Image (cartoon, coloured by chain):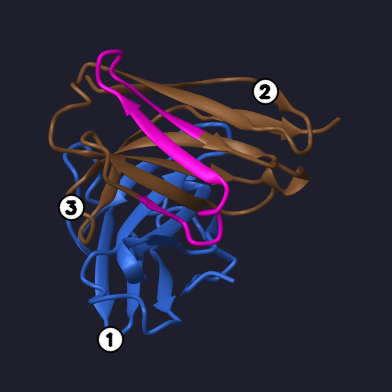
Amino acid sequence: QVQLQESGPGLVKPSDTLSLTCVVSGYSISSSNWWGWIRQPPGKGLEWIGYIYYSGSIYYNPSLKSRVTMSVDTSKNQFSLRLTSVTAVDTAVYYCARIKGDILTAFFDYWGQGTLVTVSS
Amino acid sequence: QSALAQPASVSGSPGQSITISCTATSSDIGGYNYVSWYQHHPGKAPKLLIYDVSNRPSGVSNRFSGSRSGNTASLTISGLQPEDEADYYCSSYSSSSTRVFGGGTKVTVL
């Protein structure tokens, strides 16, 4: 059974860097899949952040591209998200997910439970 | 503003059928043959319901079905049940290998 679990600080100060990790179990991250991050601000809809292939190919949401970095650690079977210069608008539940298909056909078939990150001083 | 427009809310009585639309508002939504739908109960992980417009993953009830007409994809829930009350999102490929979600539709079972 594929499982994903997000982890990281629940509170980040404005202008700091948000860092989250997604640990994958029951499936090798080095298999032919893309891995993604999605977020949901309070009271709003889902927003795609980006996705990364195990070999390092990456695509980011253009609106976040200047502040986002994603990486993969195959030795730990996990992938990570960094978002710099955060403000209150970055407060959201952050989800990691496995992607099935290629970039054109991609859909998210397994999701983590999500982790709430609040940006506040 | 999302490039995929969904109604903010749809409601129906138990046993009825409802349809949620997802309309591409941008010509950047390529092909539109790769729409997926997700059910999201607050506080839980979103769940994949439909992929590639009309395909259902194993384990998803056949009460959920997807279709497409022109630049509008639709999710139909047949035999509406109380546990179907949730938020529903469509998603599609967008330009330059990116992805977009619709704004979401809140389904209420009356």
* Pointer 1 residue: B70
Is residue A37 rendered to the left or right of residue B85?
left
Identity of the residue drawn at 36% across and 79% down: B28
Separation of residues labelled 1 and 3 (CA atoms): 23 Å
Mark 1 is surrounded, within 10 Å at the Cα level, by few (under 14), some (14 to 19) or many (20 or more) other residues, namely few
Residue interval drawn in magenta: A59-81
Q: Chain of mark 3?
A: A
Q: In the image, what residue type sits under mark 2?
A: Gly
Number of marks present in the image shown: 3
* Pointer 2 residue: A10
Chain seen in brown: A
Q: Quadrant of the C terminus of chain A?
A: top right
Helix, strand or loop for disc 3:
loop
Separation of residues labelled 2 and 1 (CA atoms): 43 Å
Residue A102, label in figure? 3
Q: In the image, what residue type sits under mark 1?
A: Gly
Chain seen in blue: B
Depicted B20 relative to depicted B84: above or below:
below
Residue B91 colored in magenta in the image:
no
Separation of residues labelled 3 and 2 (CA atoms): 32 Å
Same chain for labels 3 and 2? Say yes or no: yes
Q: In the image, what residue type sits under mark 3?
A: Asp
